Image (cartoon, coloured by chain):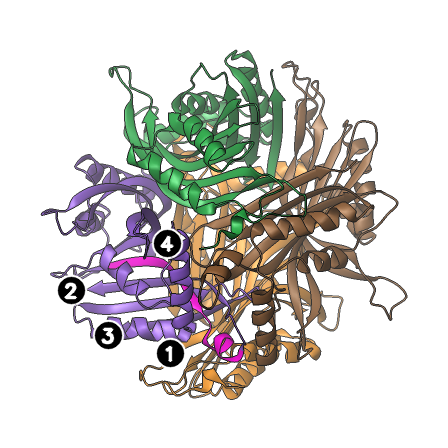
Chain colours: A green, B orange, C purple, D brown
Amino acid sequence: MKDIQNQKDLRNISIQKVGVKDVEIPLKIERKPRQDQDKTLEETVYAKVKMSVSLPSHYRGTHMSRFIEILNEYKKESLLSSDIEHILFDMKNRLDAKDAYLRFDFKYFINKKAPVSSLSSSMCYDCAFEGEVDENCNYKFYLIAKVPITTLCPCSKEISKYGAHNQRALLTLKISYDNDAHIWLEDLIKMAETCASSEIYPLLKREDEKFVTECAYENPKFVEDVIRDVVLKLDENNIISFYEVEIQAFESIHNHNAWAYQKCYKR
Amino acid sequence: MKDIQNQKDLRNISIQKVGVKDVEIPLKIERKPRQDQDKTLEETVYAKVKMSVSLPSHYRGTHMSRFIEILNEYKKESLLSSDIEHILFDMKNRLDAKDAYLRFDFKYFINKKAPVSSLSSSMCYDCAFEGEVDENCNYKFYLIAKVPITTLCPCSKEISKYGAHNQRALLTLKISYDNDAHIWLEDLIKMAETCASSEIYPLLKREDEKFVTECAYENPKFVEDVIRDVVLKLDENNIISFYEVEIQAFESIHNHNAWAYQKCYKR
Amino acid sequence: MKDIQNQKDLRNISIQKVGVKDVEIPLKIERKPRQDQDKTLEETVYAKVKMSVSLPSHYRGTHMSRFIEILNEYKKESLLSSDIEHILFDMKNRLDAKDAYLRFDFKYFINKKAPVSSLSSSMCYDCAFEGEVDENCNYKFYLIAKVPITTLCPCSKEISKYGAHNQRALLTLKISYDNDAHIWLEDLIKMAETCASSEIYPLLKREDEKFVTECAYENPKFVEDVIRDVVLKLDENNIISFYEVEIQAFESIHNHNAWAYQKCYKR
Amino acid sequence: MKDIQNQKDLRNISIQKVGVKDVEIPLKIERKPRQDQDKTLEETVYAKVKMSVSLPSHYRGTHMSRFIEILNEYKKESLLSSDIEHILFDMKNRLDAKDAYLRFDFKYFINKKAPVSSLSSSMCYDCAFEGEVDENCNYKFYLIAKVPITTLCPCSKEISKYGAHNQRALLTLKISYDNDAHIWLEDLIKMAETCASSEIYPLLKREDEKFVTECAYENPKFVEDVIRDVVLKLDENNIISFYEVEIQAFESIHNHNAWAYQKCYKR
């Protein structure tokens, strides 16, 4: 059968990214060991994948099925997050490309204890791993977490006789760090939660609800306050080489959202 | 050209609904006149349309393009909401069907004054018109509005030293009423807003923010309270023959939502 | 602490459904054993949960945290799909309700072999389990699968010199069956796929792509044809007591979708 | 009342973007005049707005309500697209910011004639205007259009006895051009449509369906082909100073999408 993709293309245009997206696959990742555990645990998550390579000007098309084949091969030997680098180099080599890009989006569950009753329940976070390899074979990895929190408005608290409007907000962090270092999703998420007016929990009994209500009231924060507190922590962490932070608050008194954004290449 | 849709079908199955969805069209509707106006104003909204007819067992297919043609014809003479009945009868007749169904979903803007400063701004509501004609040529119309509101938790207020968690919630109302009566979207939405802990506004200056914060604190409501207050109002309105109400609160202390639902055929 | 939810309510309105939605939890379900396996395998999926009970008129509110507690208890003993009945009875009893409702939505992966190369890959389907217990303690279970398929237009094929427009379509099946019977997701999905112009696959090599292209061209089907073929199969299956089928085709020649719908209580 | 936002902030962090999003407003824009018209027509669209400014390190917060006030002021004198520049400068000045950013997303309807029957109907496109003013008061405007098209797979056509898989695809274009030039949405969209295997229409009679089916079969294109053809046209247009193009094809034979991406600063 003819290989149409391999036809010579005369338009003289190389394409920056060609690939597949919304591919859904089971993905094995490593979980941070608890303090009483001496090794990491593997866990299966379900990922939505976006993958691409660059395409030289002389080829008409890339071979889209190879993206799926590469994923399948890594799946046989249990797909690990730490293999992102190898998948990227395989993509680059087998698709004869200058560079390669990959992103896995998945839901990640972490057990959380309610602040007073200590009842434990599973909290779900939208997370992602992103990676790229450039033409000089430099590999870069990004860790992404979307962390739901509570924000309570300092202005509303200050000017009102009682009460203060508060709401769910979503704090999105994307970081990169040196290849010989490691940051766990669990630690990135915990750091984000400490910057909120209050953390969010799946299960709260009455004594917990009292605690989080009062905690939020005692820690009023604008989206500006939250993003600054996050930035302070990201700046002082020497392992982190890059960050991008966004917060969006689903204002309880409006039908629109407040948001703030910061991006920084530390080196 | 052969008319494949008109082929005889031998499977002996009549289909309940066949049609098109996610058709986007400009739609002319009537706006409630202000007190100082003596007639209604026409206004263009942008609607997403879902239309269907039943298909007798002996036809292989319906003629999908006729749905669009019917919409186009009504557009020429300016598409009015009051024409839903005529569009449905046209669908029923021209597609040779026992019954017909139609729904327009659109965004609707209403000017709202801030409670203290009286500053005016446009508030957007997701609304819909739905209609159906049955085999006995009975026409039924449904009015739908999704109304964002604030709810403040009575339990959180009661047990906490200060503050109370509150959040944006979405109250969805669907009503039907006698064909010789009329209810404006403006009035349905206003009724819904009076059942909230506090209304929501696009523009609030500081004196308004103080007002809505205190108002919510003084009117703590569970989703159960809101739905009961709405149901009371719908029950006592004699024009309304059917209602369906749903409320979903985007809890500020959880990453999941509280919800409540009620449906009632009054006659 | 005061139990505000237990306050007496004087509005005299019982609520049909009160509960939580968009709760995300890991859920252990059973997978259909392969022919060479003598027992079922357990597998963890990630579910979005909707749960509710009815609320008697004399209570002000339900206890929302109990929904999460009930889920947590079943999780400890590994949450099985077959426990839906027990979860529902627990909800009914512990929340002192007349009836209870529960739905788990989750992504489910099934290995699929390409039709010619026989290369295997994971195909993802959006599925759901739904259950309800009524005031007479009758339990009803529903199985839901959303199956992506290809449809190729019979009219376009007939009237055109060559080619025929085709597209991805989504076939949604919801069935109920007698409590002493069992239908696997794997079998419901397979049945749905046989009614398409062609099945859809995650991984296709060139010989496979030729096969599915020709297969679709040889099996042109309107949405009306697909739904009738599905209905025929559901009608002749005596275990099935109820079904609801919807197909939506993302027309390649339009920016709107064709759809068809059928619902039937067989007994 | 105390102005909490104006409090001095000691964290020494200036924020790159602070603002509001998902604000919904009616927006008056200009439509390209038809050949027989000598002046442009104004038309109201419904826009979702994202607006932000940078925040100096010494302020605790920005004044979110001023964003809505600025929008309201421009609305009084009828909100025109050409006012984006003035809105941005107002934002910059009144919020005492170094730079400002603004985006309006809206649905835009264009009449389209079916290729053979010449029947006219409204086609809807998701479009956006984006603008920014930097610290040196340079204004930049971006025009965005999402154009649904048909792609037909060259490989599938080549290797199959008959037929070829085809599907709806979405081509997203974002361009910038010199401030003294002008490009209409109508022209950007038309250009995009000429790069497809076939255009898409809301209303097609049988003779039109034959035409578009055969047209797509005669113009097989990978996503790579479409993006190269678009890039060629954008490169040769001297007015355009920047472009970003993405295409996503909803493959009819897979449950995932093919995509390609290109971005270029021409000057």
- Please say whether residue B196 is one of the residues in the magenta stretch: no
The residue sitting at 61% across, 30% down in the picture is A261
Q: Is residue C148 above or below residue C59?
A: below
Is the Cβ of the residue at disc 2 closer than 8 Å to that at disc 4? no
Question: Depth-wise, is mark 2 or mark 3 nearer the camera?
Answer: 3
Q: Residue A215 at x, y = what percent?
A: 45, 24
Q: Which mark is drawn over residue D134?
A: none
Disc 4 secondary structure class? loop
Q: Which mark is drawn over residue C235?
A: 3
Q: Residue C38 at x, y = what percent?
A: 9, 47
Q: Nearer the viewer, residue D200 or D141?
A: D200
> Is D259 situated left or right of D255 in this image?
right
Part of the protein shown in magenta: C142-159
- Please say whether residue C158 is one of the residues in the magenta stretch: yes
Q: Nearer the viewer, residue B14 or D75?
A: B14
* 10 Å crowding of disc 1: few (<14), some (14-19), many (20+): many
Residue C254 seen in the current view:
no
Q: CA distance from mark 4 to mark 1?
A: 29 Å
Residues behind callouts 4 and 1 on a single chain: no
Q: CA distance from mark 3 to mark 4?
A: 27 Å
**What's the magenta bit mostly, secondary-structure-wise?**
strand
Is the Cβ of the residue at disc 2 closer than 8 Å to that at disc 3? no
Q: Amino acid at mark 2?
A: Asp
Q: Report the chain holding disc 2.
A: C
Image quadrant in which you'd find residue A224? top right
The residue sitting at 85% across, 68% down in the picture is D35
| Upstream in sequence: badge 3 or badge 4 | 4
Q: Nearer the viewer, residue B267 or A30?
A: A30
Q: Report the chain holding disc 1.
A: B
Q: Which residue is mark 4?
A: C201
